[in-house]
Image (tube, coloured by chain):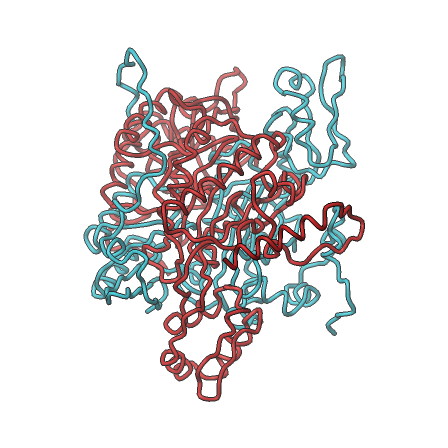
Amino acid sequence: MAQKQPKNPDKHSTFIPKEKKSTKPFHKTPMLDQLESGPWPSFVTGLKRLAHDNNMMVDLLGQLEHSYTTRKGYWKGGTVSVFGYGGGIIPRFTELMGTDGKPMFPEAKEFHTLRVQPPAGNHYTTKMLRQLSDSWKKFGSGLIAFHGQTGNIMFIGSTSENTQHFFDEINKYGFDLGGAGPCVRTAMSCVGAARCEQSCANEQKIHRVLVNNFIDDMHRPALPYKFKFKVSGCPNDCMNSIQRADFSVIGTWRDDMKVNQKEVKAFIKSKSRKYVIDNVVNRCPTKALSLNDDDTLDVDNRNCVRCMHCINVMTKALKPGDDKGITLLIGGKRTLKIGDTFGTVIVPFMKLETDEDYERIREIAANTIDFWAENGLEHERCGEMIERIGLVNFLEGIGLEVDPNMINHPRTSSYVRLDEWDQEAEKWKNRKQQAAG
Amino acid sequence: MAQATTEKPATPRSPIESGCPDGFQYMHPLMIKNYGNWAYHDRPRPGVLHHVAKSGDEIWTVRVGTQRQLGPYEIGLLCDIIDKYGEGYVRFTIRSNMEISLSSADKVEPLIKAFEEAGYPVGGTGNSVTMISHTQGWLHCDIPGTDASGVVKALMDDLYDEFIKEDMPNRVHITTSCCQINCGGQGDIAINVQHTKPPKINHDLVANVCERPSVVARCPVAAIRPAMVNGKPSLEVDEKKCICCGACFPPCPPMQINDPEHSKLAIWVGGKNSNARSKPMFHKLVAAGVPNNPPRWPEAGAIVKKILRVYKQDAKDWERVGDWVERIGWPRFFELTELPFTKFHIDNWRGSRHMLNQSAHIRF
């Protein structure tokens, strides 16, 4: 548990400055005060520290306490952007007016958020974190969220005028706004190849190839709705891309997984045979694992679906293979408008090594965005458009061939027109022949 | 905060459209050196990861929980610790935990001690309950039914021990969302606001504020239609068809969906993003009508803790909440958690037939 009495109260998450630099008196916050106790670091204490520094946060605390009391939100949107861009800022104006029609908490009447793109994998030096914080302290409330659910660094709390000054400052040292509104959004990538042996992809490169080639579609929102790229280095999908990304890139491999039998034996010795049978062999979704009498492990690689479970459990003994590449899925999103959709496979496997490979993934993304921009309805995500028009029409639209890896099983309904069956069967045969060389 | 002092330039500055910055400039040197060449990892203790590269290089990672919203004081405090006891390199996980990279095992314990002395918990790795991924809520959102940071603070206070230990059958990802759009994402357990009443319409404002055809088009169940009300062009809602999703509110704020009395919380379980073992899963509704009760939401917290207790007792190693429920079945889940099963748990939506039990498989 957290300590009752910090050894050094000046260097602790509960610290409150003695000196008050803000000129406006504090509002009473009896509800929020109850979120200052307990062992987890308190965001309320953080807001109060900022309120010692600036009047905007004094009034922000006032409005937030009001929300806690009335159980209602009081922000409305609007239009704020920086010169040259149409998006990237979430404008917030207070709706909380007194009887005189004036804002009850005037210092926080404009409280906009700037969405800024972090590097792929959210890497920082302490120097850069301090620099970003210093810039924000100069022009904004000081409050930064690491990170929003889309993946942005969120600089929360600025007046309309200061958004431009803050952006100019950080843009000069290498940061750019992310997406907001109907546009390509900021992407997310896992730590991946930088620190994880399970990574089968170069997340840093994929992330920047995808996002930075569509930067115009990010800064000038003109698409049917949002479009998100996410990159996970392996099927553990730590970026939740199948559930959350319109365009999901997942690292995988197509040769045999690697088994170090010496390490398998060592693992069994440390954990027991029963543990390995119960937790590794029996948990394989396609029954592709078999434990031999001499405590070595057989893998039926043709039937392994790359789920990652056994590799997650036996991190020293088992590894992905060498012939690495990616799987592409399209159309993941939550709730509105037709309910949840998972991304579904459109490219079962492709290599990402040469410049041509990267050009190909960029091209698939461009074709997808173009086709959806052309055919998507207003406020319709890419996956919802596919639900409406059918996967086959989408694939034809972006120039990809059908593949049985795209389905759980073939159709079960017999009511279907099969006019061009022979031509389609011929196409399949030709593709098989071509693939065979 | 300084007011803007810079004079307006004669011609505005054009942005440098640099997009996503190069991550390598901020990476620990061992990450750059061994990029794509790591061999294996283990976890020496909760909150610490140890990765070994094919070159033989080793890197230790200390994971620290944060309150997500950080100010200059917190950033200074945490960066001072990282500079003094670490090597100046840090990254954030998708769940707002900080990960500090170290090139030597000797540095791990002093760094952990420094974080704990500063009031920051080390944990969130492996089969722990890690930090809750959450949204903005009353702090910044325009359509929030509740707060986000407050719910998270209250829950993480209660789940503190589960964060710093690795005592669960498998990892537990909790999410919170302040409306049904569910920006917090899928989770093993999700706590989301559930609106229960159709929007209240201020007919005086609709004509001036809302683009009526796009509001009509926004409704997922076609419950909104144009209407003249008191001689003014407005919109009306077929309240029987309305599913109280709130989708009409952002394009038409006079259609107020938030309702301090009738906006409740709902609890969902069994979401899983990973492909490990089973395919990815969405979370499913298990409890609704939970009071939206700031500042500490005790009723929601009690249900979450109850589900976690039962999961911890009953699930087998490596089963995520969703895997566990698939094994024991939903009747047993409701029995063990003592949550009521109602007609609202059965989805009556088009295409929901695959959610019904189309077999004679029954557990007794």
Question: In terms of depth relative to the viewer, which is nearer, A429 or A74?
Answer: A429
Q: Residue at x 35, y 68 (%)?
A: B42
Residue A243: % across, % down = 55, 49
Q: Residue at x 44, y 83 (%)?
A: A296
Q: Is B114 on the left or on the right of B298, as rendered?
A: left
Pick the quarter of the image with the N terminus of chain A: bottom left
* Residue A101 versus residue A296 in the image, above or below: above
Residue B94: % across, % down = 42, 50
Name which quarter of the figure residue B146 lies in: top right
Q: Is A171 on the left or on the right of B165, as rendered?
A: left
Kindly indicate which chain is depicted in red in the rendered structure.
A
Residue at the outermost bottom position: A293
Residue B307: % across, % down = 58, 62
Which shade is chain B?
cyan
* Residue A336 versus residue A273 in the image, above or below: above
Residue at the outermost right position: A415
Q: Is B322 on the left or on the right of B217, as rendered?
A: left
Name which quarter of the figure residue B277 lies in: bottom right
Q: Residue at x 63, y 31 (%)?
A: A377
Residue B180 visible in image: no
Question: In terms of depth relative to the viewer, which is nearer, B292 or B193?
Answer: B193
Residue A290: % across, % down = 52, 79
Q: What number of labels is visible?
A: 0
Question: In terms of depth relative to the viewer, which is nearer, B350 or A193?
Answer: A193
* Residue A15 versus residue B112 in the image, above or below: above
Residue A170 visible in image: yes
